[in-house]
Amino acid sequence: MTTLHPDPPYEKPTPHPENRFMALTSNCDDMPTLFVDTHASLDVLYDTAHYRIRAVTQVLENLSMRGSIDCESFILSDFALLCAIPLRDGCDVLDVIGRRLRARSAAN
């Protein structure tokens, strides 16, 4: 029979400008598991941000073209969270792109 061992204590990563991986703001607690590779190429970072922002934009545009939508407030709250998470992820990636472009401009 296999003996189960508890995981070692979690050490929260310390934010530092030179860390390659930046935790996404949308992580649900103090133990982040979703990260952005800040050293990824700019075109990959752009595509990642664009994909998330475009997906939410399309959902909201489709919703706005419908007639009246009756639903409970908790459903609207859940829907808003569903839209906010990928938007926040996209903004986090855009922040990485901005920092990289500013650093490139400062180096020139």
Image (cartoon, rainbow, N blue to C red):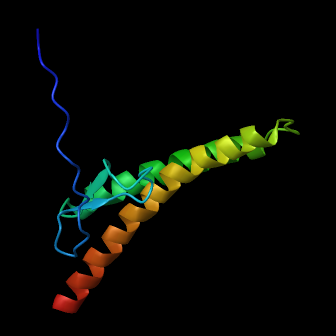
Numbered circles on residues, count: 0
Residue depicted at 22% across the width and 56% down the height = 11
Q: Quadrant of the N terminus?
A: top left
Q: Position of residue 50 (x, y in %)?
A: 43, 55
Q: Is 104 situated left or right of 77 in this image?
A: left
Q: Nearer the viewer, residue 6 or 61?
A: 6
Image quadrant of residue 13? bottom left
Q: Position of residue 79 (x, y in %)?
A: 66, 42
Q: Nearer the viewer, residue 48 or 21?
A: 21
Residue 108: tell me if it is visible: no
Residue depicted at 41% across the width and 52% down the height = 27
Residue 95: tell me if it is visible: yes
Q: Is 29 situated left or right of 54 in this image?
A: left
Q: With respect to residue 58, does 4 lie above or below?
A: above
Q: Quadrant of the C terminus?
A: bottom left
Q: Position of residue 36 (x, y in %)?
A: 28, 57
Residue depicted at 49% across the width and 50% down the height = 86
Q: Is 48 situated left or right of 63 in this image?
A: left
Residue depicted at 22% across the width and 74% down the height = 16
Q: With respect to residue 8, does 93 lie above or below?
A: below
Q: With respect to residue 42, does 69 lie above or below?
A: above
Q: With respect to residue 102, does 15 lie above or below?
A: above
